[in-house]
Image (tube, helix red, strand yellow):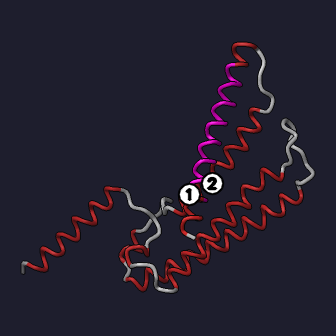
């Protein structure tokens, strides 16, 4: 199962890169055509916007999996492990609810816009809203798995804070731990 999840996230990273490359080609090509040849690619703006939306949603999934989202953890870091665990459970339950809202809203929009075509490309607008479906389902699955790990006790005390610190914050924590151990060993 771990291998399948790993392959899924490699696929997501590849799709993010492809979205970025497509955006660059479309926008740059359109600029060159407009200035050099006084023409342009009519679907360039629309498709680049779609690729941007998909790239953001897929990037948010990868960041969620890698715990790379920004956060303010100064209070949670000072709590004992039980307090950290409670905060993590509450946070995950709220995030799962938000994932449900994103998924259900995207589903409703995809159904409503299934027969609506985009003005420039002629593609179904449901493809645009499908980004929310992929995000809601995948993020919900990630969060439920993490919630299972928290509730079952399979998450170590070091993993109870969901955000990743910068290198400077980690250095400060290391220095503070060294100072507290030095004070306790030398009265």
Name the foreground residue: 186 vs 151: 151
* Residue 78, picture quadrant: bottom left
Q: Is residue 109 left or right of residue 11?
A: right
Q: Is residue 137 above or below residue 14?
A: below
User: What's the distance in space between the residues labelled 1 and 2, CA to CA?
Assistant: 6 Å
* Residue 148, picture quadrant: bottom right
Magenta-tinted stretch: 8-32
Numbered badge on residue 62: 1
Residue 108 is one of the magenta-drawn residues: no
Are the residues flagged by discs 1 and 2 in contact, CB closer than 8 Å?
yes
Residue at figure coordinates x 58%, y 70% from the top left:
1
Q: Which residue is mark 2?
A: 58
Circle 1 crowding by C-alpha within 10 Å: few under 14, some 14–19, many from 20 = many
* Element carrying mark 2: helix
Q: Position of residue 122 (x, y in %)?
A: 88, 40
Count of numbered circles on the image: 2
């Amino acid at each position: 199962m771990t291998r399948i999840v790993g392959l899924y996230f490699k696929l997501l990273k590849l799709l993010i890169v492809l979205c970025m490359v497509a955006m660059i080609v479309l926008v740059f090509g359109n600029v060159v055509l407009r200035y050099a040849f006084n023409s342009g690619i009519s679907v360039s703006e629309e498709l680049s916007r779609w690729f941007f939306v998909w790239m953001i949603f897929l990037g948010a999934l990868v960041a969620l999996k890698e715990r790379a989202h920004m956060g303010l953890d100064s209070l949670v870091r000072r709590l004992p492990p039980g307090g950290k665990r409670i905060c993590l459970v509450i946070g995950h339950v709220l995030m799962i609810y938000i994932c449900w809202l994103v998924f259900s809203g995207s589903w409703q929009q995809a159904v409503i816009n299934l027969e609506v075509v985009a003005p420039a490309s002629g593609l179904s607008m449901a493809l645009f809203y499908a980004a929310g479906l992929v995000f809601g389902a995948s993020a919900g699955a990630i969060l439920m798995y993490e919630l299972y790990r928290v509730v079952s006790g399979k998450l170590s005390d070091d993993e109870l804070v969901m955000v990743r610190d910068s290198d400077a914050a980690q250095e400060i924590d290391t220095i503070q731990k060294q100072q507290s151990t030095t004070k306790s060993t030398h009265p």
